[in-house]
Image: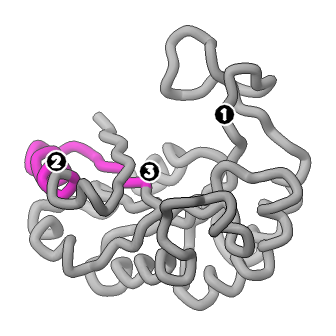
Amino acid sequence: MVVILNAGTKKKPQTIKIINYFLQRGNKIQLSTKKFVDYKDLVELSKNINYYGQLTIFVSSSTISKWNKLEKGTTQPTERFKSFEVMERLNIPVVLYTKPVLHDITINDVDQYIEIIKKYKISDVVVGSIIKTNGTGEVAPFVNDNSMHTQPIAQEDYIRSRLLKVCNVYTKSIQVLENFK
């Protein structure tokens, strides 16, 4: 079973407790966040990780240049990206999650994303579509009734092609987890 959590700072102690609970039972955890993840918060948790990829952190960023307008209530990307230090300090995979790609916004930050990928030696990035009730793409993985679909935009292909020159690029987070098997 894969447990997917979205983390916020207000619920950090509860989130850590939940992660620990599921790790001790051998579950894979996918933690997605737009906040800074300090490796100090994960030191105790790391003792319950039995294999590489059991806990994977996805640092989400749909934009760098317009984050303060479009990602209100989140941590500034430069601070958020410091979460990638967890990879070196604790050998816990951390993935850049540029999902959803925002039309005419995310594409303008590609060069900045490449700099971040190089700076933190990021090997895996997810570049994916927004999910909408009236989308035209694949059924969202978390619904059973076809009520939500991805809404791909052409700019995603360009972003993926640029990032593929410096790292592995995926369209879904589950593809990254499958790669760790």
| Secondary element at image label 2 | helix
Magenta-tinted stretch: 15-32
Residue positioned most to the top: 145
| Secondary element at image label 1 | strand
Question: In the drawing, what numbered circle is on residue 54?
Answer: none
Residue 27 belongs to the span the image colors magenta: yes
Q: Which residue does the numbered mark 1 point to in the structure image?
A: 131
> 54 and 86: which one is in front?
86
Please report contact status of discs 1 and 3: CB closer than 8 Å, yes or no: no
* Residue 114 position in % (x across, y down): 72, 80
Q: Which residue does the numbered mark 3 point to in the structure image?
A: 177
| Secondary element at image label 3 | helix
Classify residue 2 as left or right of residue 51: right
Q: Residue at x 30, y 49 (%)?
A: 29
Q: Residues within 10 Å of mark 1 (few under 14, many from 20)?
A: many
Q: Which residue does the numbered mark 2 point to in the structure image?
A: 18
Q: Residues within 10 Å of mark 3 (few under 14, many from 20)?
A: some
Q: Amino acid at mark 3?
A: Leu
- Distance of label 2 from label 3 (alpha carbons): 19 Å
